[in-house]
Amino acid sequence: MRKVLMANMSSKGQVVIPYEFRNTLGLTTGTPLAVFTDGSTLLLKPVEIPDADVFERLLKESKKAAKSAGLKKSYIAKTIKKVRSESRS
């Protein structure tokens, strides 16, 4: 379904998503939205915040996978620092 409706931005940067879209997508007050841009286009994507139990399980699985791959905290920290410094250049 492709449809275009107009919305305006307030002085505070707030945008009202048209009712038809909110209704179609099941958006309600407080629905978390991820905001993406490629520099000329803005995309709002509803996201589900995982349950704390699901997050804990994923964290445990990630730690187990990192350990079995031989990754160490020091390597990960060094890599993050390197990537962040490269992205600023």
Image (tube, helix red, strand yellow):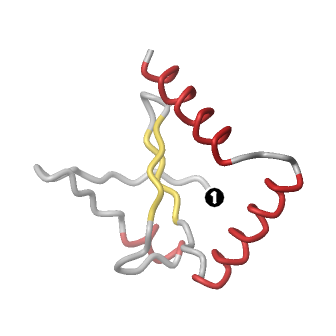
Residue 6 x %, y %: 33, 51
Q: Callout 1, which amino acid?
A: Met
Toward the viewer: 81 or 45?
A: 81
Q: Quadrant of the N terminus?
A: bottom right
Q: What residue is shown at x 68% (from left), y 38% (from top)?
A: 75
Q: What residue is shown at x 22% (from left), y 57% (from top)?
A: 14
Q: What residue is shown at x 57% (from left), y 72% (from top)?
A: 48
Residue behind mark 1: 1
Q: Could you tell me which secondary element the residue under label 1 belongs to?
A: loop
Query: In the displayed image of the protein, which residue is found farthest to the top?
Result: 89
* Residue 73 placement, left or right of 13: right
* Number of marks: 1
Query: In the displayed image of the protein, which residue is found farthest to the left?
Result: 11
Q: Quadrant of residue 64?
A: bottom right
Residue 5 x %, y %: 39, 54
Q: Is residue 44 above or below residue 74?
A: below
Residue 45 x %, y %: 52, 58
Q: Residues within 10 Å of mark 1 (few under 14, many from 20)?
A: few
Toward the viewer: 76 or 55?
A: 76
Toward the viewer: 51 or 28?
A: 51
Query: In the displayed image of the protein, which residue is found farthest to the right?
Result: 68
Q: What residue is shown at x 59% (from left), y 33% (from top)?
A: 78
Residue 43 x %, y %: 48, 47
Q: Quadrant of the C terminus?
A: top left
* Residue 75 placement, left or right of 19: right
